[in-house]
Image (tube, rainbow, N blue to C red):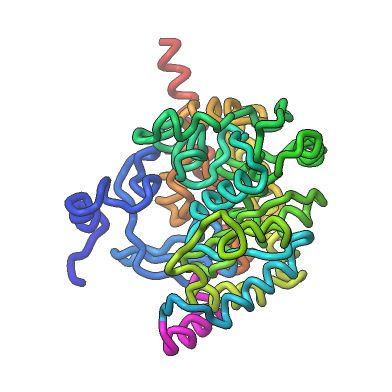
Amino acid sequence: MVGLTNESLYSRGLDVIPGGVNSPVRAFRSVGGTPYFVARGEGARVWDVEGVEFLDYVQSYGASILGHAHPAVIGAVRDAATLGTTFGAPTEGEVRLAEELCARVPGMDQVRLVSSGTEAAMSALRLARGVTGRPKVVKFAGHYHGHSDALLASGGSGVADQGLSGSAGVTAGAVADTVVVPWNRVPELDEDVAVVCVEPVAANMGLVPARDGFLAELRAACDRVGALLLFDEVITGFRVDRGGATAMFDVRPDVWCFGKVIGGGLPVGAFGASAEIMSNLAPLGDVYQAGTLSGNPLATAAGLAVLRELTPDAYEQLIATASALADGLASAFGEAGVAAQVPRVGPLVGLFFGSEQPQDYDDAKRSVDGGHYPRWFHGMLSRGIALAPGPYEVMFPSLAHTDADIARTVEAAAEVAADIAAATERAAQEELS
């Protein structure tokens, strides 16, 4: 459309959508400026409505592990769409996707497909309470499990990006049985705890890995009191390993949540467990959960197409790409004299400004409060590199990112790091004068 701009679309959006966007971090509130509106994507790149090209490390926050508009995914969705887009009845595709998920994850016998990661976590929480007959839920500060009331307390990512610790509209009663504890410290559990919810790799407060042995210790703590352990693998599932974090860390939870990768860029989620635990779900048991669009045929077709591409060689490539990115960024900051940490877990890459790698949410917040991220974000964006518009997110290199893309990113990072160093020096001089 002639004359279409990011500014004009944002202005129109503000009239009809709260904040002009449909997920808060997209509004650029934590970095400033006007959001770019994506017109199309291909591989590692997106183009905005003004025709500007960006090398994209958002990749739909990890959903597009193959890159944008991968031919296998587009073909699968096109073929499925010609047969109908939704039926409210069982289809072959949902059985095939469930079979594939269960075959990959050790100990997971059955899954229930839903339409989002939030819905998966909300449903898994209800299942855990129903199975154990216990009320309490333990979660870690800075871990994000979607926006259901009971799990929103002290959430990371988009919640933290908005400067919120929770949300208005969540009653005291809704979180009365939610216990929030520090990450990387094993909590004291009692026999009222139904489930401990954890991101096995904390990736919604920046990237803060579990310390060595922590997940195994958490497994043992749950076992001592008969609580269930839930791995929220909406980010890590089928990205860090063929079998997700369970395979990567050799620690088996009781319940899993998935999203992003398993839908190939379409709305999807899933939660799973042993057949014994899942038998408590309706129609077999008395824990109710339902969804009109659950097992949507387009989403299952896209998810199956993606999983077929995720071979052992693909994971080796993802890790090699992420390693090159992390090492290159660390070198760029080091050469510029900017204190920064670039953690990497498998194919996930994070960034913190400061001399120490954060170990929990309080550490991560101190890094963010230093205020360097907006300058970093806009400096990279002006050089054609799209990162998440919030300091608590991670970078998602995809299978579409090439060595040349990484080299270009590191070159841009060196320039922006030099700008940050100069700005820091100016601020220090002004403070002295």
The answer to which image quadrant residue 96 occupies is: bottom right
Q: Residue at x 82, y 51 (%)?
A: 250
Span of residues in magenta: 67-84
In the rendered image, residue 53, in percent from the top left (x then y), is placed at 40, 64
As drawn, the residue found furthest toward the top would be: 433
In the rendered image, residue 322, in percent from the top left (x then y), is placed at 67, 55
The answer to which image quadrant residue 306 occupies is: bottom right
Name above or below for residue 131 compared with residue 425.
below
Q: Residue at x 54, y 68 (%)?
A: 263
| Numbered disc total | 0
Q: Residue at x 68, y 62 (%)?
A: 318
In the rendered image, residue 83, in percent from the top left (x then y), is placed at 44, 89
Name above or below for residue 291 compared with residue 395.
below
Residue 152 visible in the current orientation = yes
Left/right placement of residue 53 relative to residue 132 reads left
Name above or below for residue 28 compared with residue 314.
above
Viewer-proximal residue among 177 and 346: 177
Residue 71: within the magenta?
yes
What is the quadrant of the N terminus in the image? bottom left
In the rendered image, residue 393, in percent from the top left (x then y), is placed at 52, 45
Left/right placement of residue 305 relative to residue 429 reads right
Residue 324 visible in the current orientation = no
Specify the principal SS of the magenta part: helix
Residue 25: within the magenta?
no
Viewer-proximal residue among 169 and 65: 169
What is the quadrant of the C terminus in the image? top left
Name above or below for residue 219 compared with residue 319.
above
Q: Residue at x 64, y 64 (%)?
A: 111
Left/right placement of residue 110 relative to residue 424 reads right
